[in-house]
Image (cartoon, rainbow, N blue to C red):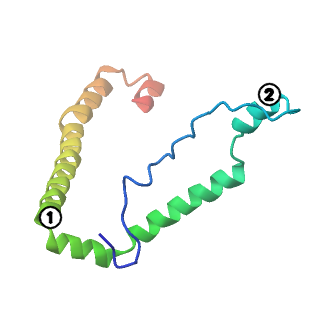
């Protein structure tokens, strides 16, 4: 499917991280030491190449993220996407509220009880807890 930006979405065509090329042994040209051929095959990419590629991928992700119009379009036209979005929001809400309730009902009372067990004379312990 073509998106409105003119780019095509191909998640399987551009794997991340990019696949490493297979090492293929080839005969050394006459007069070339085998070590030089092996060094050429094992050349690591320069840091500039890696940074440039990483920045390009990051920038493409930012461009995709700010295209709210496309997001709303797909959300409005696909029942599957609406359903999955609602499921995601519900799951995140349950986890968020559950963590707050877990803290309020278990961790905070346990720390309060621990503070009561520690004698008030031991100031360093009460400040730590």
> Which tag is nearer the camera, tag 1 or tag 2?
2
Q: Position of residue 17 (x, y in %)?
A: 49, 45
Is 125 above or below relative to 57?
Answer: above
Residue sitting nearer the eye, 10 or 53? 10
Give the residue drawn at x 38%, y 25%.
120
The residue at 48%/26% (across/down) is 124
- The foreground one among 121 and 91 is 91
The residue depicted at 36 percent of the width and 75 percent of the height is 67
Residue hosting label 2:
34
Q: Position of residue 87 (x, y in %)?
A: 14, 54
Q: CA distance from mark 1 to mark 2?
A: 59 Å
In screen coordinates, is 126 left or right of 95?
A: right
92 sits left or right of 16 in the view? left
> Hey, which quadrant is residue 2 in on the image?
bottom left
Q: Nearer the viewer, residue 26 or 55?
A: 26
Q: For mark 1, what is the residue? A: 82
Q: Quadrant of residue 98?
A: top left
Mark 2 residue element:
helix
Query: Where the C terminus falls, by quadrant?
Result: top left
> Are the two marked residues, 1 and 2, in contact with CB atoms closer than 8 angstroms?
no
Disc number placed over residue 101 in the picture, else none: none
Q: Which comes sooner in the sequence, label 1 or label 2? A: 2
* Residue 44 position (above or below residue 91): above
Image: 83 above or below 69: above
Residue extending farthest right: 31
How crowded is the residue under tag 2: few (<14 C-alpha within 10 Å), some, or many (20+)? few
Q: Position of residue 90 (x, y in %)?
A: 15, 54
């Amino acid at each position: 499917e073509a998106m409105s930006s003119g780019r095509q979405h191909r998640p399987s065509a551009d794997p991340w991280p990019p696949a490493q090329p297979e090492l293929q042994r080839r005969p050394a040209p006459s007069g070339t030491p085998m070590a030089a051929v092996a060094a050429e095959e094992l050349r690591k990419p320069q840091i500039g190449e890696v940074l440039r590629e990483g920045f390009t991928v990051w920038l493409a992700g930012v461009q995709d993220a700010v295209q709210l119009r496309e997001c709303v379009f797909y959300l409005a036209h696909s029942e599957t996407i609406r359903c999955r979005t609602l499921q995601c929001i519900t799951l995140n809400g349950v986890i968020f509220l559950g963590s707050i309730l877990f803290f309020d009902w278990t961790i905070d009372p346990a720390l309060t009880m621990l503070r009561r067990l520690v004698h008030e004379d031991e100031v360093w312990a009460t400040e730590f807890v």
